[in-house]
Image (spheres, helix red, strand yellow):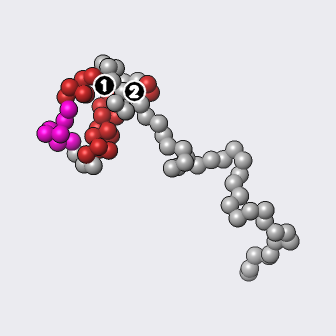
Amino acid sequence: MSLPLLAYAPNSQNHQVNGHKVPGDESPRLRGIETISSRNELDILIKVAYRQVFHEQQMLKSNRQILLESQLRHSLITVQG
């Protein structure tokens, strides 16, 4: 059984439902030191930053920047910095 054709033409090809938005590349999830509530979340944030900078899945001891990590933990620098 086939579907019947519409009696009217659609308004647009990419119609979106109001109030329903799927997060994606247009609205990235922001992560920063301001949204951190625990030490574990800060450790995850540091790992994510290393992954983004060095493009590695595991953090190598030779690539770690202990001084910068310490400054970030004490809010002396920002994630962007």
Residue 15 coordinates in the image, percent (x, y): 71, 58
Residue 50 coordinates in the image, percent (x, y): 27, 40
In the image, is 29 to the left or to the right of 61? right
Q: How many marks?
A: 2
Which numbered marker is on residue 33? 2
35 inside magenta stretch: no
SS class of the residue under badge 2?
Answer: helix
In the image, is 22 to the left or to the right of 39? right
Residue 44: name its quadrant: top left
- The one nearer the camera, 46 or 67, is 67
- Can you see residue 62? yes
Cβ atoms at labels 1 and 2 below 8 Å apart: yes
60 inside magenta stretch: yes
Which numbered marker is on residue 72? 1
Residue 31: name its quadrant: top left
Residue 8 coordinates in the image, percent (x, y): 85, 69
Q: Residue furthest front?
A: 81
